Image (tube, rainbow, N blue to C red):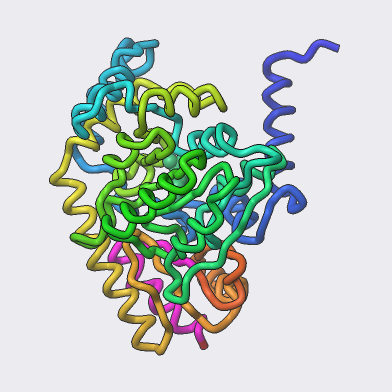
Amino acid sequence: MKTTRREFGKVALGTAIGAMSGTTLIGNKAQAQTRKAHATGVYHDGIMQLNQNESARGPGPKTLEAIRAHTTKRVGMGYSPDHVNELREGIANYYGVGTENVLLSTGSTPLLEAITRAYCDENKALVIPMPTYSTSLQAARRINAKAIELPLGRDLGIDLDAVARNAEGSGLLYVCNPNNPTGTVHGPDVIEKFVRSVMRENPDVHIQIDEAYINYTRPGAMETALPLALEYENVSVTRSFSKAHGLAGMRIGYALAQAQTLEKIDAAWGLGDVNSLAAVAALTALEDEEHITWEAQENAEIRDEVVGFFRSQGHEVPDSNTNHIFVNLGMPAAKFRAACLENNILVGRDFPPLEQTHCRISLGSREQMKQAIEVFKKALG
Ligand SMILES: Cc1ncc(COP(=O)(O)O)c(C=O)c1O
C-alpha cells in the first residue's frame, strides 16, 4: 500500500505522540512531565520550567536582531554555508586558535557522544563522577563500554584525585567544570595539576572538560582548560551556546582541541550540520560580551537570592557557578518535585545517587523565582 505524504505525516505524528506519552520509553517522571507538557502545549504558559538549564532571559538584543536581519529567503533560509565557516573562523579568532582547532556540532550533545565513542569501548572504560551530566554515561552504555562511576567529594565537588586514580587502562575521563547538577567548580591550578599528572602517568587516556556553564562562573573561580587542550593531544574542551547565550533551540556546540584529536572525534559520530541562521546567531552572541556580562550578573543576583532563601531555612547548598542550584532538601527529589508541580512549577529530575536528598533547581527570571520561592516554602512544609 502506498502511503501519501500526508498520511505519512499522520503516522509519524501518531508515533511521536505515542512515544511522548509512553512511560516505558521515558527514563523518569520529570522527563515524562516535560514531554507531557510538550504534547499538551501547556509548556510555556502553564508550567514554570525550572528543570532545564536554559537562560531565563534568552539571547541578547543584538543576537535577536541578527537573526531577524538574516531571516531572508536567500541568506537565512537558502543553503548558505558561508555563515557556518564564519562561525568557525569567529570562534577561532575569539580564542586565538586555528580553525583546525574548532569542531562545530548541533549542540554539544553529539560531541559528548562522539568523544565517548572515540575513546571508549568494551575494554576502555568511561570514568565519570556521579552525579554529573549524563550523556557520556548513556553513550558508554550504548556501546557496551564499562563505566566507572565515582562518588563526589564531601563538598559535592568532583573528586579529581579519585578520577585520576582510575585513569590507568581507561578510555575517557569526563570532567564537567562547572559540574551539572552540583554547580561546583575547580579553579585553574587544580585543573592544571590534575591534567598534567594524568597525562604524565597515563598519556593514553583522554580527558574531556565540559565547560558548558563557564559563562556563569563567579569571577576568578575558574579558567578555560583550552591551553591544556592545545598542549596535549589527549585533552579536549567542549562548549555550548545553549546556556548563557540563550540559544538552546538553535543547537550549536563546539569542541576545542588539537587538529588530529578533533579529526578522531569527528570520525566517531555524526555531529550534524549547523544551520546558517544558528551560525549567525551564535557568532553575534559570542562577540556580544556586554550581554554575556549582564546575563552572568543577573543570574548571579538571582542565584544569591534563591540560595539565600534555602540556606535561611537550614538547607545546605553548595556555592553554584551555574544557572542552577543543587539543594539538600532532606527529602526525596520526587516528593519535592510533585509538591512543586501541584503549583505548576517543574524542578529537576532525579540525580542518582543523591535523589533521596537533593534536588536541582534551574534559575528562572527574578519574577519567576519570587513566585517560586513562595511555592518552595509550601513544598518544604
Ligand atoms: C554540562 C552539559 N554539557 C552539555 C550539555 C548539552 O547541551 P547542548 O547539547 O544543548 O549543547 C548540557 C545540557 O544541559 C549540559 O548541562
On the rendered image, what quadrant is the N terminus found in?
A: top right
Q: In which quarter of the image is residue 48?
A: bottom left
Q: Residue at x 36, y 32 (%)?
A: 257
**Residue 361 sits inside the magenta stretch:** yes
Q: Which residue is drawn at 66% across and 58% down?
A: 28
Q: Position of residue 349 (x, y in %)?
A: 57, 62
Q: Which residue lies most toward the right here? A: 1
- Where 111 sits versus 76, above or below? below
Q: Can residue 186 be seen in this view?
A: yes
Q: Which residue is drawn at 65% across and 55% down?
A: 32
Prevalent SS, magenta region: helix
Q: Position of residue 375 (x, y in %)?
A: 45, 77
| Residues drawn in magenta | 360-380
Q: Which residue lies most toward the left here? A: 290
Q: Which residue is drawn at 57% across and 73% down?
A: 333
**Residue 203 sits inside the magenta stretch:** no
Q: Where is residue 91 in the image (x, y as percent from the top left)?
A: 26, 30
- Where 174 sits versus 273, above or below? below
Q: Nearer the viewer, residue 180 or 97?
A: 97
Q: Position of residue 166 (x, y in %)?
A: 56, 55
Q: Which of 149 and 351 is in front in this view?
A: 149
Give the left or right position of residue 357, taking residue 98 as reference: right
Q: Nearer the viewer, residue 363 or 72?
A: 363
